[in-house]
Amino acid sequence: MTTSQHIALQEAFTAMRRGAKARHRDIAAQLGVSEGELVAAHVARPDEAPDRLMKAQRLRPVWPQIVQALEPVGELLALTRNESCVHEKTGTYANASHSGGNDAKMGLVLGGAIDLRVVYHRWAHGFAIDEATEKGPQRSLQFFDAAGVAIHKVFLRAASNVAAWDALVAAFAAEQQPAGISVQPAPAADAEQADAVIDVSAFRQAWASMRDTHEFFGLLKTHGVSRTQALRLAEPQFAQRVEPDAAPLMLNAAARTGVPIMAFVGNPGMIQIHSGAVKHVVVMGPWLNVLDEGFNLHLRADHIASAWVVGKPTSDGLVTSLELFDATGQTIAMFFGERKPGVPELASWRSLVDEVVRETTPCAA
């Protein structure tokens, strides 16, 4: 993009943000650009007008080091989303680790409330952002993939250590600060193989032989099946299709009974996890929301094309999940009973899921 195009994006953003109070993602879509391109157009130069709503500063692409440097900042808001679900969690980025050096492909954050599984090789662009909002200044770090799609966002909170935040931004700011980014088309999803070419017997035997839930991804890869295809081909004892309204039924039952859950929401570059009870479940139009202190979930219920109750054998017994998918077969969210490795699944969670199955199993045609 040219400088004039960047300025045009800035002006359009300012008008739309002040007028309809639209979100960055929605403004970018209306302007025909990615969210990353919209943010990158706001990379500030010293000679630019000081009254712009948003200013962005490009970060060096040393993503694991940036994430590890967040711990001294203290309390922060972590936000991860996909097309259909937003997961917001307040806590500290403690106990961050990664495999390898600056070229690390995978990482973890095990800070208690902030619980992340990071796919760093999907990260392409990062920015420190200062924005004037109707509620006051908002400061964040935002990370995007090569297509300019948001992977993860970190927001400064009232209780955060601002001096540590400023030191982090100064330490990781890129030496060169050009506006704009070049984006690449999002990679096409792998085509699903026909069921007829899958060795279903071997696949089912491998599923029944699992000893850890983390083996499931390898199982899909080994047998060349997509996730929803795997659920279709699985033994009925391990995968049962339920109606999409299983999601609100489950969340409301968990809130009513106090059964602690785990809520997984992710995209190709990040999985964010909540563990604990949920209390306030609210429906607002198409959005199914959990509005709790320290944890918010916003799920587009109308995007749920299929829902499955899934059982995975482990050395601790069967682990049961409720898994939601959109019309393209992409995972929207997954829910488990709260548990730790080495501990059997909560009987109360299994009972809750059994109740949901009874209420939502599709009738045979």
Image: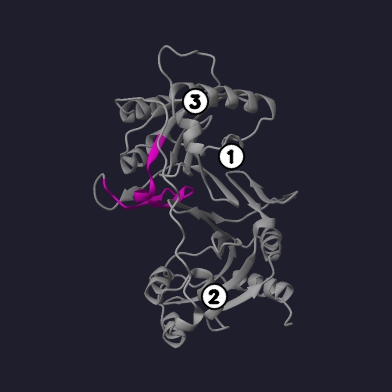
Q: Give whichever of 337, 140 is nearer the camera.
A: 140
Q: Identify the mark at residue 29; answer none if there is no mark.
A: 1
Q: Residues within 10 Å of mark 3 (few under 14, many from 20)?
A: few
Q: Residue at x 54, y 84 (%)?
A: 235
Q: Is residue 25 above or below residue 246?
A: above
Image coords of residue 138 (percent x, y)? 54, 27
Q: Which residue is mark 3?
A: 5
Query: From this viewpoint, is residue 318 visible?
Result: no
What type is the residue that disc 3 sits on?
Gln
4 sits left or right of 347 in the view: left
The disc, 2 or 3, on the residue closer to the chain's N-terminal end is 3
Front disc: 1 or 3: 3
Image coords of residue 239 (percent x, y)? 57, 77
What type is the residue that disc 1 sits on?
Ala
- Quadrant of res 361: bottom right
Q: Secondary structure at mark 1?
A: helix
Colour treatment of the image: one colour
The disc, 2 or 1, on the residue closer to the chain's N-terminal end is 1
The disc, 1 or 3, on the residue closer to the chain's N-terminal end is 3
Image coords of residue 14 (percent x, y)? 59, 23
